[in-house]
């Protein structure tokens, strides 16, 4: 494997990284690929997570959403639940966050049987953080400072997986807005600045609408 294809999977990216590093893969890459690999687990059967919790229609407010049972007794709705998504960054980490829309605003506090909330129970601590990539910001800084093709491929893979996650959510939800820089936009901002390690202004800007 002399080059990576643009659609390389995580296994291929890791194998390429090991090859070009002669088996001496940096610890920061190990941490990044471990957290990125968790994205695949969101799409398959496994441990309970916030992504699966918000998709659980047994916790949807069927009165608000005009819900009914389909031919196979599955829950269907005439109105999709309204949510807002946010790409959030701090000094080290990235998160994809979600809040329900209640009376036109994002609900940031816990709600129980609120007639205008699309969920019967909304528990932010268990439902709002759909995905967290620990140390991803540090890895992005490393990649643009002294990274290689495999590092960039891993970032591209993470970006694509996040977009796929949002596409899956869009099938079931009315996503009224997506705030903040996506991973590709964040990387572009990092690439354009002289000081790769000063990202505090990007944290503040993470509430902006993504283009």
Image: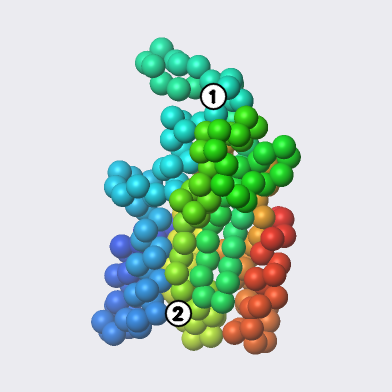
The residue located at (59%, 63%) in the rendering is 88
Tell me the quarter of the image containing the C terminus.
bottom right
Tell me the quarter of the image containing the N terminus.
bottom left
> In the rendered image, which quarter is residue 91 located in?
bottom right
Could one spot residue 195 in this view of the protein? Answer: yes
Q: In the rendered image of this protein, does residue 79 appear above or below residue 40?
A: above
Residue 197 appears left or right of 139: right
User: Which mark is drawn over residue 76?
Assistant: none
Horizontal and vertical percent for residue 11? 31, 62
Q: In the rendered image of this protein, does residue 66 appear above or below residue 105?
A: above
Q: In the rendered image of this protein, does residue 23 appear above or below residue 117?
A: below
Residue placed farthest to the front in the image? Answer: 112
Residue 5 appears left or right of 144: left
The residue located at (57%, 42%) in the rendering is 111
Helix, strand or loop status at disc 1: helix
Front position among marks 1 and 2: 1
Helix, strand or loop status at disc 2: loop
Q: In the rendered image of this protein, does residue 48 appear above or below residue 195?
A: above
57 or 186, nearer to the observer: 57
Render colour scheme: rainbow
Q: How many marks?
A: 2
Horizontal and vertical percent for residue 177? 68, 47
Residue placed farthest to the left in the image? Answer: 23
81 or 210, nearer to the observer: 81
The residue labelled by disc 1 is 62
Could one spot residue 84 in this view of the protein? Answer: no
User: Which mark is drawn over residue 148?
Assistant: 2
């Amino acid at each position: 494997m002399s080059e990576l294809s643009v659609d390389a999977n995580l296994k291929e990216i890791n194998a390429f990284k090991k090859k070009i590093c002669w088996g001496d893969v940096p610890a920061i890459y190990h941490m990044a690929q471990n957290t990125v690999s968790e994205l695949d687990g969101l799409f398959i059967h496994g441990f309970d997570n916030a992504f699966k919790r918000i998709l659980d229609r047994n916790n949807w407010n069927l009165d608000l959403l005009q819900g009914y049972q389909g031919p196979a007794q599955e829950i269907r709705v005439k109105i999709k639940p309204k949510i807002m998504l946010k790409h959030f960054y701090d000094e080290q980490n990235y998160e994809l966050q979600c809040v329900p829309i209640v009376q036109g605003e994002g609900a940031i506090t816990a709600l129980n049987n609120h007639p205008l909330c699309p969920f019967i129970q909304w528990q932010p601590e268990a439902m709002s953080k759909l995905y967290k990539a620990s140390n991803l910001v540090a890895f992005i800084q490393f990649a643009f400072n002294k990274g290689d093709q495999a590092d960039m491929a891993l970032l591209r893979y993470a970006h694509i997986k996040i977009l796929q996650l949002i596409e899956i959510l869009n099938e079931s939800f009315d996503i009224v807005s997506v705030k903040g820089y996506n991973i590709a936009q964040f990387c572009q901002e990092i690439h354009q600045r002289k000081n790769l390690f000063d990202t505090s202004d990007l944290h503040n800007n993470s509430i902006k609408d993504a283009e």
